[in-house]
């Protein structure tokens, strides 16, 4: 079935999704980076207060103990930054980024096999579409994990008849598209609305075909030279 939202509903869904994303980022910063920096601050204050005490732990030892904590904070910052915009995208392009993302996804969810079918070159993909493609893949795979119970995903990116087409197909349990579009599952609906809006704002067209026990196909396509 074709996925569709009215424009006003779509914008409302997207705004809600954006606020949810911001709330999640804020929570991650507070729970991980914030707590780690608080622990470092507390340790440093103890070192300063006890510096002149004969029984104090030598400063070098105490500072050395902070190194793993600081390293943990650095890794958390990198993880959060990668989820927002991978540096690979700017340094090496979308094809390398998609390959990296699929490898990381496979590590996190080894029960789901991903097949990549990429049939175009980096220079054939317009620069402004690269982040759009990445975000759609990111959201689509997130939906697979959260909702589909799929065992395999096929990710295809190709050029046909002066259009670039992105297909993400899974063999999961599927769903009734219009039921989701009409508000049957608000969380999934926001994700679908976000993918549709990203595609259309960048000049493309977006469809979802799905049915119970028959999997789902997400398709986005754009005109390109």
Image (tube, rainbow, N blue to C red):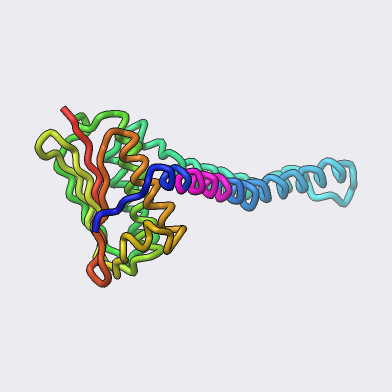
Q: Is residue 142 above or below residue 135?
A: below
- Residue appearing at x 56%, y 46% in the figure: 25
**Front position in the image: 92 or 131:** 131
Q: Quadrant of residue 164?
A: top left
**Front position in the image: 172 or 12:** 12
- Residue appearing at x 31%, y 35% in the figure: 130
Side (left or right) of 159 relative to 201: left
Q: Is residue 65 visible?
A: no
User: For residue 222: magenta?
Assistant: no
Which residue, as the protein is rendered here, is positioned at the far bottom?
213
Q: State the quadrant of the C terminus.
A: top left
Q: Is residue 47 visible?
A: yes
Q: Quadrant of residue 70?
A: top right
Q: Identify the magenta region.
A: 13-24
User: Percent from the top left, x then y, of residue 212?
Assistant: 27, 70
User: Percent from the top left, x then y, of residue 1?
Assistant: 24, 59
**Front position in the image: 124 or 49:** 124
Q: Main secondary structure of the magenta part?
A: helix
Side (left or right) of 37 relative to 211: right
**Front position in the image: 135 or 70:** 135
Q: Is residue 215 above or below residue 16?
A: below
User: Percent from the top left, x then y, of residue 39?
Assistant: 72, 50
Side (left or right) of 101 relative to 8: left
- Residue appearing at x 26%, y 58% in the figure: 114
> Disc count in the image?
0
User: For residue 14: magenta?
Assistant: yes
Which residue, as the protein is rendered here, is positioned at the far left?
161
- Residue appearing at x 87%, y 52% in the figure: 55
């Amino acid at each position: 079935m074709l996925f569709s939202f009215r424009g006003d509903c779509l914008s409302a869904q997207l705004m809600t999704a954006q606020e949810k994303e911001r709330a999640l980022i804020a929570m991650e910063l507070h729970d991980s980076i914030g707590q780690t920096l608080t622990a470092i601050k507390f340790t440093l204050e103890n070192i300063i207060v006890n510096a002149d005490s004969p029984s104090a732990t030598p400063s070098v030892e105490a500072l050395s103990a902070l190194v793993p904590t600081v390293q943990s904070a650095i890794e958390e910052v990198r993880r959060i930054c990668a989820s927002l915009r991978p540096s690979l995208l700017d340094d090496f392009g979308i094809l390398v980024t998609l390959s990296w993302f699929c490898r990381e996804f496979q590590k996190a969810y080894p029960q789901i096999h991903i097949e990549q079918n990429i049939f175009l070159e980096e220079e054939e993909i317009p620069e402004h579409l690269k982040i759009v493609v990445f975000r759609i893949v990111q959201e689509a795979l997130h939906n697979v994990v959260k909702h589909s119970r799929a065992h395999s995903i096929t990710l295809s990116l190709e050029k046909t008849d002066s259009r670039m087409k992105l297909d993400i197909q899974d063999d999961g349990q599927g769903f009734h598209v219009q039921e989701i579009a009409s508000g049957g599952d608000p969380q999934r609906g926001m994700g679908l609305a976000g993918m549709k809006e990203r595609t259309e704002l960048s000049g493309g067209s977006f469809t979802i075909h799905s049915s119970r026990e028959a999997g789902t196909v997400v398709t986005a396509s754009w005109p390109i030279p």
